[in-house]
Image: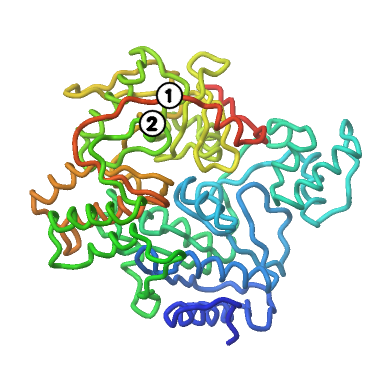
Amino acid sequence: MSLPAITFSDDQAEAFDTIAEALRGVGVDLEDASLTPRAEGKTRVMAVLGKAGSGKTLLLAELVKALEAAGVDTISGDYEGRRRKDRRTLAILAPTNKAASVLRMRGVPATTIHRILYTPVYDPEYERIAEWLTGNGEKPEIEGLTEQALERAWNFYQAQKSVPGALAAAGLRGSDFITGWKRREEPLDIGFIDESSMLDERQFDDLKEIFPTLVLFGDPAQLAPVNAPGGMVFEQLPAPAKLELHRIHRQEADNPILDLAHALGDPELGFEDFEALIQQKSREDDRVVWAERVEVDLMARSPVLVWRNATRIRLINAFRAVHGAPEDALLPGEPLICDGIELPLKHRKKRLDLEACGLIKGAQVIYLGPGRKPGFSRLHVIGAEEPQVSAASIVKIEKPDEEEPFIPFAANMGATFLHGAAVTIHKAQGSQWENVQVFAPDLWAAARMGRSEAGQPLWKRLAYVAVTRAQERLFWVVRNRLKKPTHPLEIDDLRAAVKPAPFALEAET
């Protein structure tokens, strides 16, 4: 068949053709750009597998373009519109806000799995505007909204394709037009899932219920989820359903970070050999840094990646100490990691509100200051499409050699947070940062222990995941020391980078 106007490797071209053939079998013909209504039937699951740099994201993006050109509607988690029998849809999902934002920065309209599992409920009056914006209704007349306001909404939607953003541009608040959230009851159509190595069995089962056609994109060299003793979900697929990409692609000539990641595939490479290779790369290319100390200034936006929990806790407390953070409060600008939601079953709706706004387990957050109500925090959710939220919070600061965490302040119930200046490599999966610091003494300890996972030394799997989190620059930290910060913690960059949020959550508990 005719391929997109881009140079594919042989394995990418074969994967594209195989997926295109599967889509043709369910009524989506990419070659003829023709669609037939979706027929009920058995779920079809396929997987595109490859290591970092093998071209998975490029293939995903080109498939999205081809589906859009064929007339398939790409849907997000903010609004779907009325269902039509002849409508074919595609959703591009990732397990975390950060992973979804990485795709969006590359022009792929991705959202999180949670934002598809839970759908917003719109006020009927303002839903008429959403239907008009999405081409399913006439231009409405809404009391209190001028022609100029509707024009601003229209212009915003043409540029951004976000219904909440368009309604915000018209001068509405989220609480005006979104009355709540509900778990999805009706199935969708085609789903592309990036970073699928992070999926556990429960998430995989949820996705198979929603999407009759499901394509997973994943890296088999990463670490399996902690709560997945059976390994990564795509490992259970039959061989014909797994499409492997072998050739390594580089968007720029000679990426030293990818070179290091793929060097770990050499069975003869030992830890000392790997560190020697890092030193060599650091002398040749400033994208790799042999660091004698942890850069404290970087920790506020990208955590230090560690293996051991004790290391994580020590680094967090050192970060707070050098910034003069008080024992009983957080400073604006301190990073947090969402550790889940503590709400009783009767507050299920509030749980949906929190999760729909991006506060899912593992979400990276920057503390902006106290909320208007006791126990509430103003937060910036990294990678979320509408990042500014205010939510009831329980913040836990772990201390070295103490079993119970210190809680500087807390609501009775709500979203729980751990400090985010350092995180384990397991929790870093699915995320990428411009600059990444890897705490090498922890990986040396893993190498000394001689542990293996899936037939490979554990230190190599840890190093592979850690190194491939770096988009631009890798810092290999070899000593347990911190540099002094060059400036106080700040949040002005977050305020400047974000438009006024379409809605800010104030979830009462």
Q: What is the quadrant of the N terminus in the image?
A: bottom right
Q: Which is nearer the eye, 86 or 318? A: 318
Q: Estimate the spatial distance between the alpha carbons at disc 1 and disc 2, rounded to whole Å.
A: 8 Å
Judge the density around disc 1: few (<14), some (14-19), many (≥20) Cα neighbours within 10 Å: few
Asked whether residue 382 is in view, the answer is yes
In the displayed image of the protein, which residue is found farthest to the bottom? 1
Amino acid type, residue under disc 1 in the picture: His
Horizontal and vertical percent for residue 173?
72, 31
Asked whether residue 223 is in view, the answer is no
- Contact (CB < 8 A) between labels 1 and 2? yes
Q: Is residue 10 above or below residue 494?
A: below
Horizontal and vertical percent for residue 448?
8, 49
Q: Secondary structure at mark 2?
A: helix
Horizontal and vertical percent for residue 314?
23, 28
Horizontal and vertical percent for residue 290?
25, 46
* Residue that mark 2 sits on: 297
Q: Residue at x 89, y 33 (%)?
A: 143
Q: Is residue 477 above or below residue 133?
A: above
Judge the density around disc 2: few (<14), some (14-19), many (≥20) Cα neighbours within 10 Å: some
Residue 482, located in which quarter of the rendered image? top left
252 sits left or right of 118 in the view: left
Residue 487's tag is 1
Q: Is residue 308 above or below residue 406?
A: below
Amino acid type, residue under disc 2 in the picture: Asp
The first of marks 1 and 2 along the sequence is 2
Q: Secondary structure at mark 1?
A: loop
Q: Residue at x 55, y 31 (%)?
A: 493
Residue 113's tag is none
